[in-house]
Image: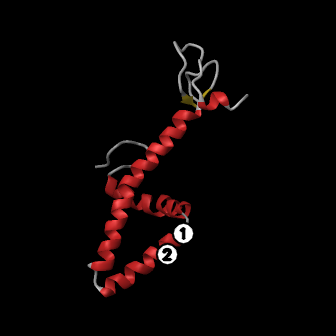
């Protein structure tokens, strides 16, 4: 296997022409896996750009608000919390959100269990 098919269009069996396809598993790839990395890389870059379009203005406006408009007492609380969060890896923050924040949000979401899709009450 060479690296060329991972980033180039590939002519898969049953397709009318060459295509960029990413399908790592599933019930429809009976003959061969479809592993073009181009859709995967493009999707990652697209998701990153969209996240930055939201996060950068929000972070700048929050920093401006805290530095210019909050009281010194509130600033004394917010600044150490932000510095502590900056010191933690995002994996740790995700673990905390998954183990503590998500279960505490379940009652307010009105669900009865993980992935059940039913509403309680």
Q: Quadrant of residue 60?
A: bottom left
**Residue 13 screen position, x and y as percent:** 60, 14
Q: Which residue lies furthest to the left in this view?
A: 69
Residue at point 41%, 52% (across, down): 51
Q: Can residue 113 be seen in this view?
A: no
Q: Name the residue under label 1.
A: 88
Residue 84: numbered disc: 2
Describe residue 90's horizontal placement relative to residue 115 as left or right.
right
Q: Give whichever of 108, 16 is nearer the camera.
A: 16
With 41 as the anchor, is 3 left or right in this view?
A: right
What x and y, as percent, mark residue 109?
Answer: 33, 53
Mark 1 crowdedness (10 Å alpha carbons): few <14, some 14-19, many ≥20? few
Disc 2 and disc 1 in contact, CB within 8 angstroms: yes
Q: Position of residue 93 (x, y in %)?
A: 50, 64
Q: How much space separates mark 2 and mark 1, taking CA atoms?
A: 7 Å
Q: Is residue 67 above or below residue 16?
A: below
Helix or strand or loop: what does disc 1 sit on?
loop
Residue at 55% in and 18% down: 18
Q: Nearer the viewer, residue 105 or 74?
A: 74
Q: In which quarter of the image is residue 29?
A: top right
**Residue at the extreme right of the image, as rendered:** 1
User: What kind of element bears circle 2?
Assistant: helix
Say which residue appears at 53% left-offset and 26% top-offset: 20
Badge 2: residue crowd in 10 Å (few <14, some 14–19, many ≥20): few
Q: Quadrant of the N terminus?
A: top right
């Amino acid at each position: 296997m060479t690296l060329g098919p991972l980033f180039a269009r590939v002519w898969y069996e049953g397709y009318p022409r060459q295509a960029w396809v990413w399908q790592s598993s599933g019930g429809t790839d009976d003959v061969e896996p479809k592993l073009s990395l181009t859709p995967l890389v493009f999707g990652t870059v697209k998701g990153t750009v969209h996240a930055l379009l939201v996060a950068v203005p929000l972070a700048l406006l929050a920093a401006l608000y805290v530095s210019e408009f909050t009281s010194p007492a509130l600033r004394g609380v917010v600044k150490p919390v932000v510095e502590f969060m900056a010191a933690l890896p995002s994996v740790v923050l995700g673990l905390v959100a998954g183990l503590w924040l998500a279960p505490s949000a379940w009652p307010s979401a009105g669900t009865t269990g993980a992935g059940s899709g039913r509403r309680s009450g």
